[in-house]
Image (cartoon, rainbow, N blue to C red):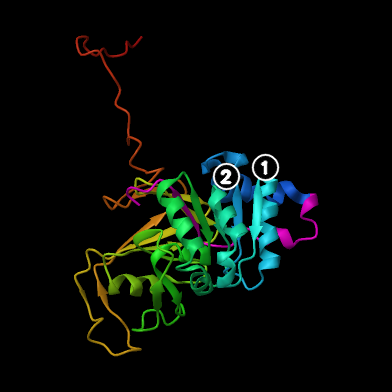
Amino acid sequence: MNNVQGKLIIIGGAVDKGSFTETSYDQNIANNLNFFETGILKRIISESKHGENSRIEVITTASVIPRQVGPQYVKAFEYLNAKNVGLMYIEKREQTKDTEILERIQAADVVMFTGGDQLRLTSILGGTKLHDIILDKFKNEDFIYAGTSAGAAAASNNMIYQGSSQEALLKGEVKITSGLSLIENVIIDTHFVQRGRIGRLFQAVVGNPRVLGIGLGEDTGLLITSNGKMEAIGSGLVILVDGRQITDTNLTQVELGKPISISNLTVHVMSMFDTYDLNTHTMEIHNSQYSIPLYTPVETDADEPLKADSID
């Protein structure tokens, strides 16, 4: 993220809570938008170049039901007073050459990639002119790449695209390929806590301990800025897996399908407002129990002797 002007906002999934499929959505807008008003989508707007006036393009490429998913996000942004939101159904590589689509991407302040299948996303967009424009804007402009679920998983150089949670610590069960390459030396997994995917991240990290594993819970995200600082946003947990201190493993000794052993793997757990520095690999807990003194000493005048209370 060094020498980059843009920001990443990666989200673990389930940000819409299903609210937009409820028939009473409009009548219960205050309740249904509680998460949005205090959470991640609102933060996307506030972090963007022009705030509520920023041009936001929602891209549904990863989804197999784009015409159901896309309008939900447009509606959410509009309810949060975003005034300039567009929707793009990019379903084939040929569409990435379309002049109108490329002009819209070039003019965008935010691109928001929805959930779905990250391999579908990278296979359609990877290596195209559209992909090049996003990378260039991210490097050189005040621009936000936002992605939820598949859109988040695809943001890094290395991308998990397959692997069951139950079999994740058996050698060969986790499949990794190249992502969209907005950020290096991390690998991102989503729906992390709810689907028990920590084993997937363990295997991804033990294969290359230089890579920091990032597990995003639902309703949870990370804001990653150009100085390499990551801030947890949303209501859930972010799990970080740091393999740099691994002392031993049997990874190269066991056959495919056999359990993997790992010694001295470091795990951090982040919640809202906690930060992690990708440059120094240090975490700061926002509401640390050690940030408040255990006791406050009573000040006394050193020149005045203590006096006993008088007894009548």
Q: Which image quadrant is residue 287 in?
A: top left
Q: Secondary structure at mark 1?
A: loop
Q: Amino acid at mark 1?
A: Asn
Please tell me which residue is depicted at 35% across the width and 72% down the height of the picture.
Answer: 204
Where residue 85 appears, as percent x and y from the top left, is 65, 50
99 or 229, which is in the foreground?
99
Q: Secondary structure at mark 2?
A: helix
Where residue 3 appears, as percent x and y from the top left, is 33, 47
- Is 197 above or below relative to 284? below
244 or 269, which is in the foreground?
244
Residue 8: say if magenta: yes
Q: Amino acid at mark 2?
A: Ile
Q: Find residue 45 and name its label.
A: 2
Q: Mark 2 touching mark 1, by CB under 8 A?
A: yes
Please tell me which residue is depicted at 26% across the width and 81% down the height of the picture.
Answer: 251
Residue 226 placement, left or right of 75: left
Q: Say which quadrant the C terminus sits in.
A: top left
How far is the residue under mark 2 from the one under mark 1? 9 Å
Where residue 59 appears, as percent x and y from the top left, is 59, 61
- Is 196 above or below relative to 29? below
- Where are the magenta residues, as a range? 1-27
Q: Answer whether residue 80 is visible to the viewer in this image.
A: yes
Residue 270 placement, left or right of 121: left
Residue 109: say if magenta: no
